[in-house]
Amino acid sequence: MGTYKVRVATGDFLLASTFSSISVTLVGTHEESDKQLLDNCGKDFNPGKVEEFKLKSRRWLGDIVLVRLHKEPYAFYPTDNWYCSYVEVVSPHGQSYRFPCYQWIEGYRTLELREGKGQMVFDDADQPMLLQQREEELKQRRKCYEWKEYSPGLPHCLAVDNIIELDGNSMYSVTKNTNLLLRSTNTQVRMRLKGFLSCTNSWAKLEDISKVFCFSKSPITEYVQEHWREDTFFGYQFLNGVHPVTIRKCTKLPENFPVTSAMVAPFLGEGTTLTDELEKGNIFIADYKILEDITANTINNYQQYIAAPICLLYVQPSGELVPVAIQLSQHPGPDCPIFLPSDSEWDWLLAKTWVRNAELLVHEAVSHLLLTHLINEAFTLATLRHLPTCHPIFKLLLPHTRYVLHVNVLARSLLLRRGGIIDKAMGSGLVGITELMAKGMSGMTYTSLCFPDDIQERGVDDIPNYYYRDDGLKIWSAIESFVSGIVQHYYHSDAHVLADSELQAWVDEIFRKGFLGNKASGIPASLQSVSELIKYVTMWIYCCSARHAFLNNGQFDFGAWMPNFPSSMRNPPPQAKGATSLESYLDTIPDISTTGRTIYIFWVICCEPGDSRALGTYPDEHFTEEEPKQLITAFQEHLAQISQEIQERNKSLPIPYRYLDPQEIENSTSI
């Protein structure tokens, strides 16, 4: 007989407490205790409190391996939800056990918590009770998180239609919900009062466009407005703008892009030729073939247009990247001229604007929505369905699933629906963006998702002033080092990876449901070694954190001045030179209401509305062993050093590149 001390921690935030009756059962390797009510004098389970209870047992229980929390009705109080952070148990002999929870317990139910040590399924092989516990946990999760087909050719998603169908552990916190609602409502009211969401006229003057974002200017938005016409700034954005993943080294011109040496000779300088610069590796290309034949939208009853341009760029001796030729179609001919910097001011500016429009369409549909939001949802669902809470990979990945399901369900119900903002503001509309995502899905590769491989495959490993590349490689390396430590702590050989049936089922479901079984993509359907597991997990953590940050957080900075990042084009691409004027330019770029809607959504989603957790911030202690804790600390120190280096470099830059500063990177795709 002895007395066990049971400490229960309640989450330190609004509405985390409970009035329900909470009881506990301790399950040991030898015996299990009787169910006992946890009740001290006064109100228990208050927000942010750790409360201790004493549990007397007539028997020695052995090592405590499970805790059962029973949440039941109390008196006349209505059903509520309780956020339990963890339970600690101290045995009569002074042995301490910690049981991480960090989840909402909704309604009345019994929740079983495992002791905090990371355990794979083969670690429980000789303990039928623990095997049954992990099987029952996954069985319940699979009922809660079911798949459905979102659209043919796209990753499957969570089978709910509205955020009210989500469980509490998937939903935004009260803080985040409130801040997002206030930000969205305030911005929309301001724009409606100024008439920016109802006027369908063209802009009368370029200068008037600045009125849309006059309430939220920043040094970067002002810099963009001042420099957007310059070729050097146009080229800069391929390296450090909101979509720095397009360009690749050009060693041979495509057959459908008949640029001659004579055409571009004036822009390469004396004593060199196009052939020379191709051989030196100074020529780069941005090809938007993926936009060919994408259905164009109708906005405000006016037909919109989509081009599939090709842009040739040159690295000058100064290190600046500049455009030297633009073709606005994949099919050269008399009706498809190649525009050059020597053309008239408005011809050349319109050609560059078509490229910027192509950048926006591919950015939003493929790089942003598909390759962060939709893919990360597939990873999140498979993680919840196949890895129990005691699994070390679950512990590692859970912080990177935070709010992924909520933001995606919200996007599908508000943005990606008939009559939503996508339909009202983007030249591709809902139909076109779905086609574009499906094209992106069919051509996606594992290489493109793995940062160092993508840099090498595109041939951009030595282009100067590519801060996105430099910072991204540092972030990837930091994540990889952290992941390597965690994985190698638990998996001591390749045989352990192969023997982990839960892990293999996880990877297989991601491949089937997330990547639609596309073997040509090179994405693994199973993992054969420790090194493969490290790369795979590193890839996902990078994609849901750093990749989303650099694709999302700069949208307002570079898109608030609309002509720099137009969401639609209202006239077809010019078929001859000399036909563009200021008036025709203003009649081609988005009208006033389309501009207002686009900037509204950029402003809402680009600034984190509270309750954020930066990369490497893990307030929930899912790992209880000492070595994983030390690895987390080392990871945080590594990220802090990278942040310091980035901030120091940025002091000397006209535009600071901060989108891959660890302080600016969210742990998960949450907005």
Image: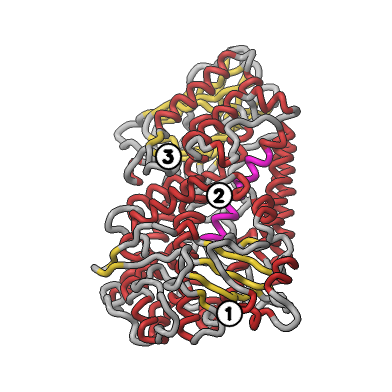
Q: To which residue does mark 2 refer?
A: 544
Q: Which residues are magenta?
A: 534-552
Give the residue at x 46% y 69%.
333
Helix, strand or loop at label 3? It is loop
Q: To which residue does mark 3 refer?
A: 156
Q: Could you tell me residue 396's position as x and y percent? A: 62, 39
Helix, strand or loop at label 2? It is helix
Query: Looking at the image, is mark 3 or mark 2 earlier in the sequence?
Result: 3
Q: To which residue does mark 1 refer?
A: 231
Coloration of the structure image: secondary structure
- Pick the residue in front: 553 or 521: 521
Q: Could you tell me residue 585's position as x and y percent? A: 39, 81
- The residue lying furthest to the left in this view is 301
Q: Is residue 95 above or below residue 226?
A: above
Q: Is residue 245 visible?
A: yes
Tell me the CA gap for discs 3 and 2. Answer: 17 Å
Q: Is residue 181 above or below residue 393?
A: below
- The residue lying furthest to the front in this view is 334
Tell me the CA gap for discs 1 and 2. Answer: 32 Å
Foreground label between 3 and 1: 1
Query: Looking at the image, is mark 1 or mark 2 earlier in the sequence?
Result: 1
What amino acid is labelled 2 in the image? Cys
Q: Is residue 403 visible?
A: no
Q: Is residue 26 above or below residue 84?
A: above
